[in-house]
Image (cartoon, rainbow, N blue to C red):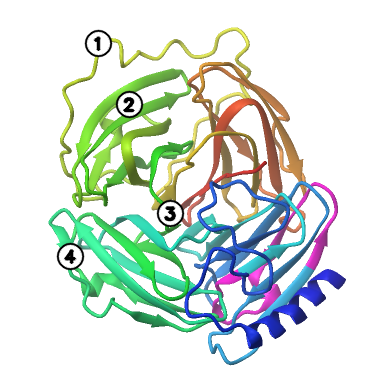
Amino acid sequence: MRRIAVVVVLMVLAGLAFVQPEPVPSQGSALGFPVPVDAAGAVGEESVWYCPWVASGAVRDSTYDVATAVNVEALITLPNVNPILEPDLLAFQLQGADARSVDTAEIVRRGESPGIVEFDDGPAVVTTAMWTENLLSGDQCVASVPKVWHLVGGTTAEGFTLQLRLFNPFPESAKVTVQAISEFGSSPLGGFEGLDVPGRSWVTEDLSRVIPFLDTVTLTVQTDPGLVIPALVLSNEQDEATWNGTSRSATWDFPVTSVPGLEPTLVLSNTGSLAANVAIDIFAPGGPILEVTSLLVSPNQPIRLELSDFADPPFGVRVRSNVPVGAVIQAAPPGTFPRADPVVGDDISDDAADPPPDSGGEGDVVAEEPVVPAVFNGLASTTGNIDPATRWIIPGVGVVPAAETSLWIINPSGDQATVTITQLGAAAAGPDKIIILPGRQVEIPFGEVTESGTSGVIIDATVPISAALSVSSSRGVAFIGGIPVE
């Protein structure tokens, strides 16, 4: 704990002495650790995580879910809604490979509670979950802070509310400019140029009032000076979904795209100057369907693609593009999202789409006997993984009360993967080793954690894979991306 105390003291002194007109990549975090700017996703020895959309109050419950592979000292900092008041802190230790789910109310119960989580060693990672009787949401926290963010998959169509959260966890103020594109091209955002977000505070804007009745909205968020962590929050009468901003990438992996009762949609956005030629690969439990479709995504013309048109869920997805694009997976009951027909390419070769082979086969280990699944009614959204990896850490397994939690893994490689799953914290029922054949998706269900909710997993694989969680209950549905680590 001594290190955490020293870090807090140093940060106070640094905050008083720090005078700089514009942030630079080497800038420290709000409490002293370095911020990895534009990191590829791997977590180094020391890390700071920023969680923009968390609340705990009279109606909402939430958790900060942490997991680590080594001994760490951890500090959760929740800035006060009044930035001149002191933040609320919780410091704790994890010994060895371990996980802990911290009830936000254990720190403070005052409504909106975006926070900062920092570790003195690693790899160590953070996700969050939030629920009421009528909604369920959750997401990764953010460990890299680019100057330009892309937020794909918004909609202000009838029946939806779309909010933009801008969280500034740093001591200096930030001036933020937000631009939007939709199916109609550029959409003006009055009052969103040079928007001031004071240090250690946050702003939430209701975009449904600013740009109403748009089917598909992409935002770019830029700051000068300062830095912010943006997130979108989409809600309807069934549920709420939240996802963070990202950079763009030429490759995106989505290990989970749906649960029973929900249909998956893929939203693609191109904010560059060149048209993007995009190919979609599907990884199903029975095998891959490579380049199931190709399409052209023109600049400033986001596209929503109904994936159930190409295969029956469940399945994972890979997006491949010749230029960097933004991508988000969203799932909801049929007919929830406005439907649009994309421009589909006609240059798919005869051997590009391979029909899925029979399920099973020698060496294919099934985690459990299949059961008749429940059908869920909710709204989920998640960003993808830029690169597969051989090691992942995912906290928050089984911690939402009365919810079904599943780990989803895709093996996008051409080689068989032997996957070892190490359970952390309170044990949740699940296998410790499985084999995943090339091009397959596997679902691994976990039971609810009953010992104070402190579970997570470390996933080690012999070839690069991608992993994510789904959390489903009568409250709603959330998809939470796994976090690759070194």
Give me the residue at 48% from left, 23% from top: 285
**Mark 3 Cα-neighbour bin, 10 Å: few <14, some 14–19, many ≥20:** many
Pointer 1 residue:
350
Comparing 217 with 35, the one in front is: 35
* Real-space CA distance between mark 3 and mark 4, rounded to the nearest whole angstrom: 20 Å
Q: Nearer the viewer, mark 3 or mark 2?
A: 3
Image height of 149 relative to 293, above or below: below
Of mark 1 and mark 3, the one earlier in the sequence is 3
Q: Nearer the viewer, mark 2 or mark 1?
A: 1
Question: Which three-letter amino acid code belongs to the residue tagged 2?
Answer: Ala
Residue 61 at x, y percent in the picture: 58, 68
Question: Which three-letter amino acid code belongs to the residue tagged 1?
Answer: Asp
Give the extent of the magenta segment: 92-115
Of mark 2 and mark 1, the one earlier in the sequence is 2
Element on which disc 3 rests: loop
Name the image quarter holding residue 422.
Answer: top right
Q: Is residue 222 left or right of residue 445?
A: left
Element on which disc 4 rests: strand
Is any atom of residue 1 visible in this view?
Answer: no
Are dots 1 and 3 in contact, CB under 8 Å? no
Question: Which three-letter amino acid code belongs to the residue tagged 3?
Answer: Thr
**Quick check: is 201 in the magenta stretch?**
no
> If the image is split into quadrants, where does the C terminus sit?
top right
* Real-space CA distance between mark 2 and mark 1, rounded to the nearest whole angstrom: 18 Å
Q: Which mark is residue 187?
A: 4
Of mark 4 and mark 2, the one earlier in the sequence is 4
Pointer 3 residue:
246
Comparing 270 with 425, the one in front is: 270
Pointer 2 residue:
311
